[in-house]
Amino acid sequence: MKIVLREDVDNLGRKGDLVEVADGYARNFLVPRGLALRASKGIVKQADAMKRSREARDVRDRGAAEELASRLQSVKIEIGARAGEGGKLFGSVTSSDIADAVFAQSGIELDRRKIELAEPLKELGAAEVPVRLHPEVAATIQVEVVAG
């Protein structure tokens, strides 16, 4: 059965895509939950309109992410933390701490979930922290953890 997706569905497609699925999957799962509509001429035209608006939004979001990435490249963030001997921190610096420091020091509001910190920073010193702003746009923040 051909259907048009009304929402993004994992392992199937994105909003506005015209896809072929098993009849039972469409009839018993996708359509009752409002995730899809049975394809007809009018629905296919609506799907094309959804795709165009999604593509325009993606282009706009990517442009905004690239502009934000260029602003973040020039920013150096300094975070104060209590440390013991040898530069080991009492606690750690997390992605949430980094997001708060970026906002406080540069005025750039950054979602902590976009900061790709493998594990929290646990020592004094400099670190490069990757940030995923868009699926196709990444940036790096220079973070300096100082005793404070």
Image (tube, rainbow, N blue to C red):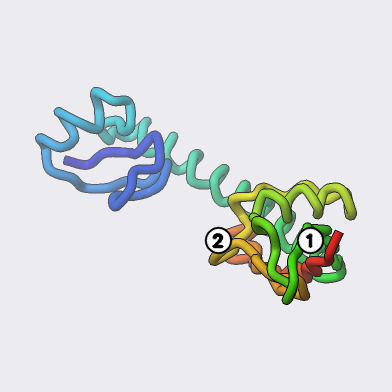
Separation of residues labelled 1 and 2 (CA atoms):
15 Å
How many neighbours does mark 2 have within 10 angstroms: few (below 14), some (14-19), or many (20 or more)? few
| Local SS, label 1 | helix
Residue drawn at the location 15% of the way across and 29% of the way down: 27
Q: Residue furthest top?
A: 32
The spot of residue 19 in percent (x, y) is: 27, 47
Q: Which residue is mark 2?
A: 135
Residue drawn at the location 54% of the way across and 66% of the way down: 118
Position of 60 with respect to 21 (left or right) is right
* Dot 1 or dot 2, earlier in sequence: 1
The spot of residue 44 in percent (x, y) is: 36, 38
Quadrant including the N terminus: top left
The total number of labels drawn is 2
From the viewer's side, name the closer residue of 110 and 71.
110
Residue drawn at the location 81% of the way across and 59% of the way down: 79
The spot of residue 73 in percent (x, y) is: 80, 70
Kindly identify the amino acid type of the residue bearing the numbered disc 1: Glu
**Image quadrant in which you'd find residue 146:** bottom right
Q: Which residue is mark 1?
A: 67
From the viewer's side, name the closer residue of 43 and 71.
71
Residue drawn at the location 30% of the way across and 30% of the way down: 37
**Image quadrant in which you'd find residue 46:** top left
Position of 79 with respect to 32 (left or right) is right
Kindly identify the amino acid type of the residue bearing the numbered disc 2: Pro
Position of 15 with respect to 83 (left or right) is left
| Local SS, label 2 | loop
